[in-house]
Amino acid sequence: MFQASPAVEPLFDAILQAGVFTSPTLFRFATLVTGLIVSMGRRTVSHSLVAIKPLLEGHWSNYHRLYSFSKFSMWRLAAVLVRQVVGLLPSDGVIELVADDTVDGKEGDHVWAKSAHRDPTRSTRCKPQLKYGHKWLVMCVLVQLKGWDRPWALPILCGMCFSPRAACRIGRRRKTPSQVARQLLIRLMRWLPGRKLVLIGDYQVVTHETVAFAQRHAQRVTVIGRLRGDANFYAQPEHRNRPSHTGRIRKGKKTLPPAKRAAQLPVVEQEVHWYGNSRRLVRHVTEQTLWYSRHDNVVTPIRWACVLGDPRQGRKDAFFFCSDPTVSAPWIIEAYARRWNIEVLFEESRALLGLETTRHWCRQSVLRVTPILLGLFSAVVLIWTQLPQARRQVVATATPCYTKRGITFADVLAAVRREIWERQLLRRRQNQRCLDLLPPSLRQAILWHLSAAA
């Protein structure tokens, strides 16, 4: 049986109680996940098995078949992760969700559903850059624990967004990021009954359809997004309760778009929480209006806010909105600024967890590998919360010439790696006392190098 360290046991016990895997598959999954955590560089199965060679039982091909042939439900596994991550938040608080899409680059001619997607990290407004792979819509929960200088985006769910060409080739229905976001929201509403959700996203995630969905479930869902400067705004109808005999949606007269309307509203100067856990004095305007979509013939009441730019500093006006018209403009601005934490997640997942380094190509593996690697980010944080207080507050990546004020994911990953190496991998079978026989200084140096995260 798989013997985990005390910090790892609560997470695997929750998976065991949920009945996600059979006993042999659970052992291989726990062993492979341990290898993914302690490995450095590529996160291929072969590379992960080398780091955990003392734990292996059976033929090595059984671990390669875990992604492609083993029968287990990714939704049931995700439900366990969702409840564990939400357990880090207050039981009566609002759950802030951040959603964004990222492209998982893949190489090879036979990769299932691979297509060309716009790469947001290398593209500019004038020249888009393409990347071949899969586009994933990732939904995260914003969590801030003691020692962190900002809230972290912990991934809990993700879904693949098919391009029109790839969907036609594999015989699947095309899914946009907005459609996937609504499907994931429905899952969370079922798994977390009674909890209020706030979803923050950009243009592609929070669309008219997303706002209409949020207002149909206004008691539980609120969405915040970006707004175009030429959006179609309308005033309230003069006779709101009078039924429409033509079947059209009732709305008042057309008003100016937000780019022009902002110059007519009173300006408020206020200090708000900004990007990078900083505070900034911003000038903003706000108004409640009706937002109309010509494509879907839908009108939704919203509260929009505009952060006025400064042409001398090259800053343009930024427009945001919320599906709840009763909220304040500073709350909308601060909430959208917290969306940037998901970009940090994507960068750290690529740098420290080997995202985009796998070699799987078949359908089952493609649909499992990326969600497991992203979920590994949250799993590492959950394991870190079970460590003793003294080990959690250690800044492992600090150097004499680089002083860190807060704990980063590199420190969390290093602490978890050290726990696994010290309590699990180096104390197997005949090597129970291998660490105890070493001098303390040499023992600490070996553990530091084994657990180095960056």
Image (spheres, rainbow, N blue to C red):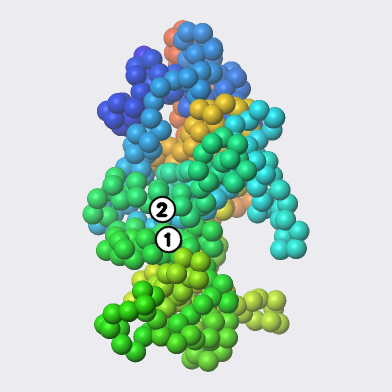
Q: In this image, 192 relative to 213: left or right?
A: left
Residue at the spot 40% in from the left edge and 18% down from the top edge: 25
Image: 62 above or below 202 = above
Residue 428 place in picture, x, y as percent: 45, 14
Q: In this image, 190 relative to 430: left or right?
A: left
Q: Quadrant of residue 95?
A: bottom left
Residue at the spot 54% in from the left edge and 81% down from the top edge: 258
Image: 68 above or below 308 = above
Disc 2 element: helix
Image: 37 above or below 292 = above
Disc number for residue 384: none
* Res 442 visible: no
Quadrant where the N terminus is found in the figure: top left
Q: Amino acid at mark 2?
A: Arg
Disc number for residue 210: 1
Q: Label 1: few (<14), some or many (≥20) within 10 Å?
A: many
Disc 1 element: helix
Q: Nearer the viewer, residue 102 or 414?
A: 102
Q: Nearer the viewer, residue 204 or 392?
A: 204
Q: Quadrant of residue 132?
A: top right
Q: Amino acid at mark 1?
A: Thr
Q: Quadrant of residue 21?
A: top left
Residue 73 place in picture, x, y as percent: 38, 30
Q: Are marks 2 and 1 in contact (CB under 8 Å)?
A: yes
Image: 245 above or below 402 = below
Residue 31 place in picture, x, y as percent: 46, 21
* Res 292 visible: yes
Quadrant where the C terminus is found in the figure: top right
Tell which circle, 2 or 1, labels the residue nearer the N-terminal end.
2
Q: List the residue tagged with mark 2.
A: 182
Residue at the spot 55% in from the left edge and 32% down from the top edge: 366
